[in-house]
Image: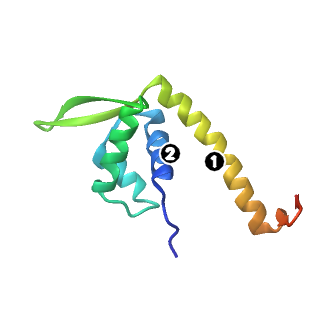
Amino acid sequence: MSFPTSSALIEFLILAILEKDDSYGYEISQTIKLIANIKESTLYPILKKLEQNDCLTTYSQEYQGRKRKYYSLTAYGHEHLLTLKEEWQTYTMTISGIIEGSIRHDKNRVSS
């Protein structure tokens, strides 16, 4: 079974991948493919959106005689990633609670 991957999750993964080191599109896509079967036609528009939203900046570097476009987190990208990590922690704790049965929604109350 495979769970669907939203563009919001892909954005989060991209920022997390770039947190430690700059990277280029193909390398980013190969890392994301460890959990989601995405295509470059999905990845590059998300990278562009993150760049337009000031989360990423780009630069070119030569590799084996060819120019490679690298992506790097901006200061805002780091801040945004911290926010997403907090949201992810809440999200996963809630899912775990539902799966384990410790969180249940009744008509007029939520128990935990």
Amino acid at pointer 1: Trp
Q: Nearer the viewer, residue 62 or 3?
A: 3
Outermost residue, top side: 75
In which quadrant of the rendered image does the C terminus lie? Answer: bottom right
Q: Position of residue 5 (x, y in %)?
A: 48, 60
- Residues at circles 2 and 1 in contact by the CB criterion of under 8 Å: yes
Q: Nearer the viewer, residue 34 or 86?
A: 86
Say whether residue 10 is visible. Answer: yes
Q: Secondary structure at mark 2?
A: helix
Outermost residue, bottom side: 1
- The answer to which of marks 2 and 1 sits earlier in the sequence is 2
Image mark for residue 32: none
Image mark for residue 12: 2
Q: Position of residue 41 (x, y in %)?
A: 28, 55
Q: Residue at left 48%, top 34%?
A: 19
Q: Secondary structure at mark 1?
A: helix
Left or right for 85, reference 62? right
Image mark for residue 88: 1
Q: Position of residue 58 (x, y in %)?
A: 30, 30
Q: Residues within 10 Å of mark 1 (few under 14, many from 20)?
A: some
Left or right for 82, reference 20? right
Left or right for 59, reference 94? left
Amino acid at pointer 2: Phe
Q: Residue at left 34%, top 34%?
A: 71
